[in-house]
Image (spheres, rainbow, N blue to C red):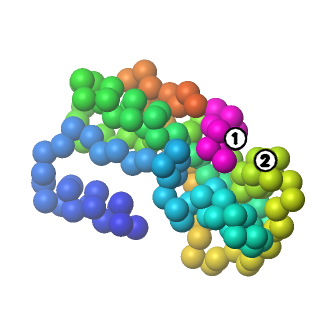
């Protein structure tokens, strides 16, 4: 909602812009501590069960921070035919929470798990439309599962 509000303000204020960047679930080595992998690492270190919501079928299209940075660098010199474009930047595949949990449990098979009810305010998943950003030659390159293993 906050991203949409800011986009609305830019457009409503009639500010000149070339494009808006809308990243989808950015992850990397220095991720936010409230992101699921970092939360699970802390829970595991403290001997607590890994908490996860719902049946594991919710998904995200994670984009690696390095891939996102590469896209933004390309945008600095990209001259689209039209202006006022919104670039949605996400990974190339839907990653379910079950897949993230399996990746984590491959590293820490003794971890305990605790299923929580899925929050009514959360989304089961959304996919970015990366068609516009691929026109400038960008696509996500980092394999999620391999990078997650490194990060964990």
Q: Find residue 16 and report its image quarter.
A: top left
Name the mark on residue 53. Answer: none
Residue closest to the eye, 5 or 113: 113
Residue at 83% over, 67% down = 112
Residue 68 position, x and y percent, is 43, 37
Please tell me whether mark 1 sits on a helix, a strand or a loop.
helix
Residue at 75% over, 77% down = 116
Residue 2 position, x and y percent, is 36, 66
Please tell me whether mark 2 sits on a helix, a strand or a loop.
helix
Q: Which residue position is annotated with label 2? A: 107
Q: Which residues are magenta?
A: 143-152
Residue 136 position, x and y percent, is 38, 23
Residue closest to the eye, 100 or 71: 100
Comes first in the chain, label 1 or label 2: 2
The residue lying furthest to the front in this view is: 46
Query: Pointer 1 and pointer 2: residues touching (CB < 8 Å)?
Result: yes
Residue 38 position, x and y percent, is 60, 58
The residue lying furthest to the right in this view is: 110
Q: Which residue position is annotated with label 1? A: 149
The quarter of the rendered structure image containing the N terminus is bottom left
Quick check: 18 left or right of 63?
left
Q: Is residue 138 magenta?
A: no
């Amino acid at each position: 909602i906050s991203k949409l509000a800011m986009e609305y303000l830019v457009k409503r204020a009639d500010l000149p812009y070339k494009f808006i960047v809308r990243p989808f679930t950015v992850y990397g080595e220095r991720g936010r501590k409230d992101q699921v992998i970092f939360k699970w690492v802390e829970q595991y270190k403290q001997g607590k069960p890994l908490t996860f919501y719902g049946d594991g079928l919710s998904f995200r299209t994670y984009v690696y921070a390095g891939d996102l940075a590469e896209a933004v660098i390309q945008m600095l010199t990209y001259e689209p035919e039209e202006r006022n474009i919104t670039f949605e930047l996400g990974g190339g595949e839907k990653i379910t929470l079950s897949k993230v949990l399996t990746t984590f449990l491959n590293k820490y098979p003794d971890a305990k798990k605790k299923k929580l009810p899925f929050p009514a305010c959360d989304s089961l998943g959304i996919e970015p439309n990366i068609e516009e950003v691929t026109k400038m030659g960008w696509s996500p390159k980092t394999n999620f599962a391999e990078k997650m293993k490194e990060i964990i």
